[in-house]
Amino acid sequence: MTAILLLLHLLGATVWTGGHLVLAVTILPRVLKGKDVAALTWFEQGYERIGMPALVVQIVTGLWLAWQKMPSLALWFSAEGGPVAQLIQAKLVLLGLTALVAAHARLRVIPRLSPATLPLMGWHILAVTLLSVLFVVVGLSFRVRWGV
Ligand code: HEM
C-alpha cells in the first residue's frame, strides 16, 4: 500500500511542481513580454484540469503517508515528534501558504486580470512555484540528509 501511495504522491508532484515550473519559466515570461492575458488564461484553464486533481491527490496521499510515519495527531504538533513531526508541520505550513496565495489569485487577481494586473499575477505564480519546489525539498528530507 505504501508503494502505491508513494507512486501517486510522486506522480502528483510531477504534475504540480512540473506544471508550475513550465508555467513560471517558459509561459510567464512570454505572457509578460507580450502582455498576453489570453495566453495565460488559455494555459491556466487547460492546466487546472490536471493541476487541481493532482493537488487533491497530494493532500490525501501526503496525509496518509504522514499518518503511516507517525500515527498520532498529537505528536505531529508536539516537540516530542522530532524531525518527522517537524517535516510534517513544514508540509502543512507550505499547504496553508499555497492555499492563501492561490485563493488570493483566484478571488482577487484573476477576476480583474488585464495587461496592467499581469505582473501581480506573475508574482502569485512565482510564489506558488517556489512553494511547490519547497514541497519537493521537504518531501525528500524525510529520507535524505542534506549536506556533506
Ligand atoms: C503539492 C504538494 C506536494 C508535493 C509536490 C510533495 C512532494 C513530495 C515528494 C517529492 C516526496 C519525496 C518522496 C520520496 O522520498 O520518495 C514527498 C514525500 C512525502 N510527503 Fe509530500 N508533497 C506534497 C504535499 C504533501 C502534503 C500535503 C503532505 C501532508 C503532510 C505530504 C507528506 C509527505 C510525506 C509524509 C512524505 C514522506 C513519504 C515517505 O518517504 O514515505 N506531502 N512529498
Image (cartoon, grey):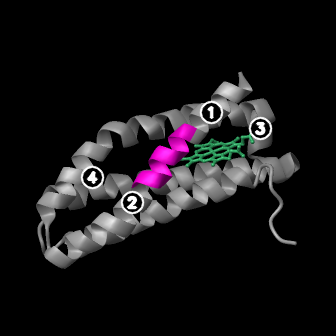
Residue shown at 74%/46% (left/top)? 77
Residue shown at 54%/45% (left/top)? 13
Residue 31 lies within the magenta run: no
Residue at mark 3 to residue at mark 2: CA–CA distance: 38 Å
Q: Which residue is mark 3?
A: 74
Quarter of the image for the C terminus: give it: bottom right
The relative height of residue 95 versus residue 66 in the rendered view (above or below) is below
Identified by mark 4, the residue type is Arg
Tell me the magenta residue range. Answer: 11-19
Q: Quadrant of residue 66?
A: top right
Residue shown at 45%/38% (left/top)? 54
Identified by mark 2, the residue type is Val
Residue at mark 4 to residue at mark 3: CA–CA distance: 33 Å
Identified by mark 1, the residue type is Leu
Q: Position of residue 143 (x, y in %)?
A: 80, 49
Question: Would you say the magenta stretch is mainly helix, strand or loop?
Answer: helix
Task: Classify mark 2: residues with Cα within 10 Å, few (<14), some (14-19) or many (20+).
Answer: few
The relative height of residue 135 versus residue 13 in the rendered view (above or below) is below
Q: Which residue is mark 4?
A: 106
Marked residue nearer the N-terminal end (4 or 3): 3
Q: Are marks 3 and 1 in contact (CB under 8 Å)?
A: no
Ligand 1 within 8 Å of disc 1? The answer is no
